[in-house]
Image (cartoon, rainbow, N blue to C red):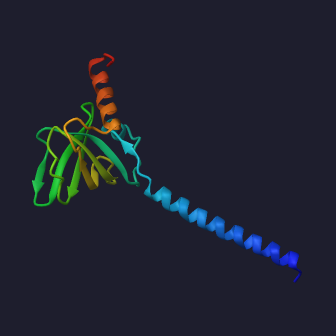
Amino acid sequence: MKARHKRFALIIGALAVIGTAAALVLNAFEENLVFFFTPSQVVSGEAPKNRAFRIGGMVKEGSVQRDGVNVRFVVTDTAHDVPVTYTGILPDLFREGKGVVAQGKLEDSGTLFKASEVLAKHDENYMPPEAQHALDQAAVERTGKTLK
């Protein structure tokens, strides 16, 4: 084999290795990409059915039901509600009427969100921007007035 052919084979091999590595990295990135949806978006069917995503809003007053480490609660943006189930220990700041972001998947029925992780807001003034926007949009829909 001539030196030119060896160089050509080496370049082709290097390109194949780089292409395979890039495909693996992009695949791992796509699997770990998690989008945020509001309860209104989930109810309207915008959220993926067979993929993990985050839902955020407020924990509806009077909706928390505990059975050991199993917890059921409702996340609301004041326009729509989504029931959530979670098995595990909730954060100390988790309270009714407070902001929450839960990560998980919709069950096959598409009406129940099974959370694998629950995050509570960490101070009195913080709310995820997406959740605040959702609450503002729900208020606009409810009152018919624009917020400033």
In this view, the residue in front, 37 or 40, is: 37
Image coords of residue 40 (percent x, y):
33, 35
Query: Which is nearer the eye, 85 or 129?
Result: 129
Q: Residue furthest bottom?
A: 1
Q: Would residue 19 appear left or right of 129 to someone viewing this image?
A: right
Image location of residue 63, percent across then percent down: 14, 43
Which residue is depicted at the point 18% across and 39% down? 98
Write the residue at 13% across / 46% down.
64
Q: Is residue 1 above or below residue 123?
A: below
Q: Residue at x 70, y 71 (%)?
A: 14
Foreground residue among 15 and 108: 15
Measured as percent of width and height from the top left, residue 89 is found at 17, 59
Q: On the image, which quarter does residue 125 sit in?
A: top left
Residue 52 on image: x %, y % = 38, 54
Q: Residue at x 19, y 60 (%)?
A: 88
Where is 17 relative to 126, above or below? Answer: below
Residue 66 is left or right of residue 118, and the answer is left
Reply above or below: 128 against 26: above
